[in-house]
């Protein structure tokens, strides 16, 4: 996972602020480093995978809400993703 590329892509794709994009990219990097996503899905977490899944969130959601929405879905389906969510108001 190239977190620099992800951060830049998030700013462009979701019209996100620098801080929000940075925090989401950092959490994605932590998720990658944990190995959990690859173990559950059989492939690595990539920029394309993150962006594609975040696009599935409701249109009115801002970037961090989209991230938490996706992580919530992963938590329901596989468990143990809660630790990668971003606290509301943290950014």
Image: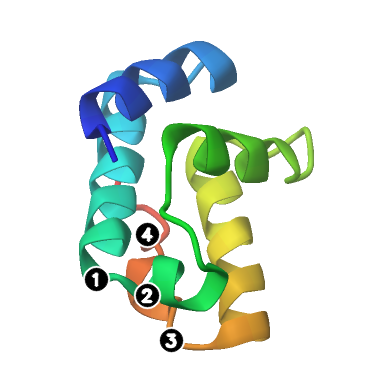
For mark 1, what is the residue? 34
Q: Quadrant of residue 62?
A: top right
Q: Residue at label 4?
A: 86
Q: Which mark is residue 80?
A: 3
Contact check, label 3 and label 1, Cβ < 8 Å = no
Per the model, the C-alpha gap separating discs 4 and 2 is 17 Å
Q: CA distance from mark 3 to mark 1?
A: 11 Å
Task: Label 2: state its secondary structure.
Answer: helix
**For discs 4 and 2, the disc positioned in front in the rendered view:** 2
Q: Secondary structure at mark 4?
A: loop
Q: Earlier in the sequence, mark 3 or mark 2?
A: 2
Give the residue number, with chain letter if any, for mark 2.
36
- Residue 25 position in % (x across, y down): 30, 39
Dot 1: what SS? helix
Q: Is residue 90 visible?
A: no
Q: Quadrant of the C terminus?
A: top left
What's the residue at 56%, 34% (across, down)? 51
Q: Residue furthest bottom?
A: 79
> Where does the image place residue 55, in percent across and percent down from the top left?
70, 35
Residues 44 and 51: in front is 44
Query: Residue at 25% across / 34% down in the picture?
Result: 3
Farthest front residue? 42
Of the image marks 3 and 4, the number of the one nearer the N terminus:
3
Q: Nearer the viewer, mark 1 or mark 4?
A: 1
User: Mark 4 or mark 2, which has the lower sequence index?
Assistant: 2
Q: CA distance from mark 3 to mark 4?
A: 14 Å
Mark 3 or 2: the one toward you: 2
Image spot of residue 21 (x, y percent): 35, 30
Mark 3 residue element: loop
């Amino acid at each position: 996972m190239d977190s620099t590329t992800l951060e830049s892509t998030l700013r462009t794709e979701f019209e996100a602020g620098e801080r929000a994009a940075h925090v989401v990219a950092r959490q994605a990097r932590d998720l990658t480093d944990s190995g959990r996503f690859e173990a559950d899905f059989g492939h690595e977490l990539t920029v394309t995978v993150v962006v594609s899944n975040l696009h599935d969130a409701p249109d009115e959601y801002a970037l961090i809400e989209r991230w938490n929405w996706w992580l919530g879905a992963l938590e329901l389906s596989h468990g143990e993703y809660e630790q990668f969510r971003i606290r509301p108001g943290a950014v």
